[in-house]
Image (cartoon, rainbow, N blue to C red):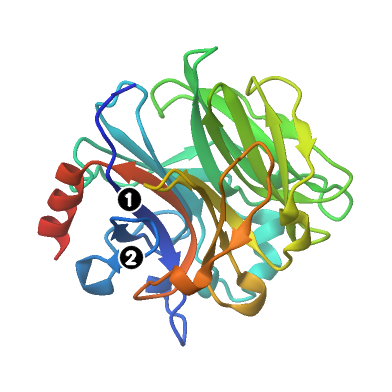
Amino acid sequence: MSNTKKEAFLFVHFTDTHPNTPMSEQIYFSVSLDGLTWKTLNNKKPVIISEIGEKGIRDPFIIRSHDGKKFYMIGTDLNVFLRPDHWGSATKNGSHDILIWESDDLVNWSETRAVTVSREDAGCTWAPEVIYDKEQDNYMVFWASRVDYGKGHHKIFQSRTTDFKTFTPAEVYIERDCDVIDTDIVEHNGVYYRFSKDETSKCILMAKSTSLSGKFEIVDSSLKDVHGVEGPQCCQLPDGRWCLFLDQYGKNLGYAPFVTDDLDKGQFTKIDADFHTEIQFRHGGVLTITMEEYDRLMKAFS
């Protein structure tokens, strides 16, 4: 992993405009120096637009490669606006693909590529994310899908890749008695902290483990008392605090930050008064970047 000092943030996301249009469900870039005050680039227009598959991109996520040489971005192949019944058929027979892009500099991105990762009996492939697994020396891509429609729950599935072109067959990663979707994982001091949305209570469940493939222990977190949220995204702020961004979809308010001084304790405090965006962020991903990368983005998309 590159030891380059990270001094700023890039948030890749889609947005809500009123009224919504097909362009709402594409990829927007926003940047910040402190993780709380954000500027949306490209004159508040999408940076990447999908012309393949469902012709939309929801829930984008971005990662720096483990060797620090390139960036990968993935997203949900879906544009709800363009579906006649909107959500109705998406869960049952949505795309089995994830959308993928690669870049060496965060500015110039490859053409949109679709790769099938879900099982044949799965519904839509929702909110994919990825994390590098040091133990297995590969990337674990994980997402939510529902199988056995009408009977089974949403589960989190996983697949492994080394090149983001070929993937191992999908396997169940998280399965509970309730629907579980929208999962984010961060590593700190050898511990993996996992945040997942419980679709029954509409809150975020937190768990931890010393191995991505090991048993995760539920953390008695204050997040269980925060309802109507999804799309968790966790990162460390410049002052050392950890910030969990949660999309307040229940009230259509976009993201709000919840911070803690100690991830292990899982006690988060909402500080949305200090959070400022130029447009409403919907489910996305946060990447820490260098000042050189920040300046390059500002210059390219101003």
Is the residue 274 above or below the residue 129 in the image?
below
User: Is residue 87 in sight in this rendering?
Assistant: yes
Q: CA distance from mark 2 to mark 1?
A: 9 Å
Where is mark 2, residue-wise? 38
State the SS at label 2: loop
Q: Residue at x 52, y 66 (%)?
A: 255
Please state the total of marks drawn on the protein image.
2
User: Residue sitting at 48 percent across and 59 percent down?
Assistant: 54
Q: Residue furthest bottom?
A: 19
**Kind of residue at badge 2:** Trp
In percent of width and height, residue 145 lies at 69, 46
Q: Is residue 48 left or right of residue 84?
A: left
Residue 40 disc label = none
Residue 290 location (% of width, % of height): 23, 41
Crowd around label 2: few <14 · some 14–19 · many ≥20 (10 Å): many
On the image, numbered disc 1 is attached to which residue?
A: 9
Q: Secondary structure at mark 1?
A: strand
User: Which one is in front, 41 or 7?
Assistant: 7
Tell me which residue sits at (85%, 47%) in the image: 152
Foreground residue, 247 or 50? 247
Image coordinates of residue 194 in percent, x first then y, are: 64, 38
Label 1 crowd bin: few (<14), some (14–19), many (20+), radius 10 Å: many
The answer to whether mark 2 and mark 1 are in CB contact below 8 A is no
Seen in the picture, residue 278 relative to 4 is either above or below; the reply is below
N-terminal label among 2 and 1 = 1
Q: 197 above or below 55?
A: above
The type of residue carrying mark 1 is Phe
The residue sitting at 44% across, 69% down in the picture is: 275
Q: Position of residue 208 (x, y in %)?
A: 69, 32
Quadrant location of the N terminus?
top left
